[in-house]
Image: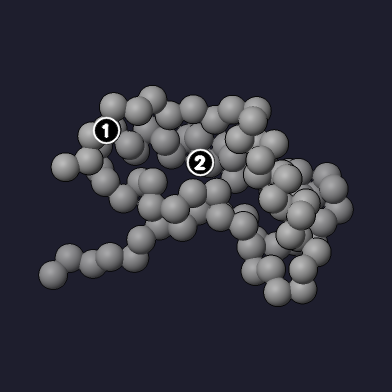
Amino acid sequence: MLKQSLTPKYTVAQFENYTAVMSAFVHYPNIAGFIIGNEVLNIPGPLTVTAPFIKAATADLKAYRDKMGYPKVAVGYAHADVGGA
């Protein structure tokens, strides 16, 4: 079972890492977008408190993209597409 004792945070260092990756790759012609997180919110419970941090990071990276005059590539979050059986 996954232990959910981590306290979410969004730091300046994380923002700087996101922007460095975007700056390094945004001008490649085959870039479809950038993903802030992957399947962080899949498990109901304590990890869902990360949603505001993911939302903030997504908004910040979009603002950075626009400020830098980069192409309007997508910025978002990847959530699993799983259905109940």
Q: As displayed, is residue 23 above or below residue 14? A: below
In the image, 6: left or right of 69? left
Numbered badge on residue 4? 1
Disc 1, SS: loop
Q: As displayed, is residue 27 above or below residue 44? A: below
Quadrant in the picture for the C terminus: bottom left
In the image, 32: left or right of 85? right
Q: As displayed, is residue 19 above or below residue 77? A: above
In the image, 50: left or right of 34? left
Relative image position of residue 48 (x, y in whole percent): 34, 38
Numbered badge on residue 63? none
Amino acid type, label 1: Gln
Numbered badge on residue 54? 2
Which residue is nearer to you in this view: 19 or 72?
A: 19
Q: CA distance from mark 2 to mark 1?
A: 17 Å
Sequence-wise first label, 2 or 1: 1
Q: As displayed, is residue 14 above or below residue 62? A: above
Residue located at (65% from left, 28% from top): 12
Relative image position of residue 66 (x, y in whole percent): 79, 50
Disc 2, SS: helix
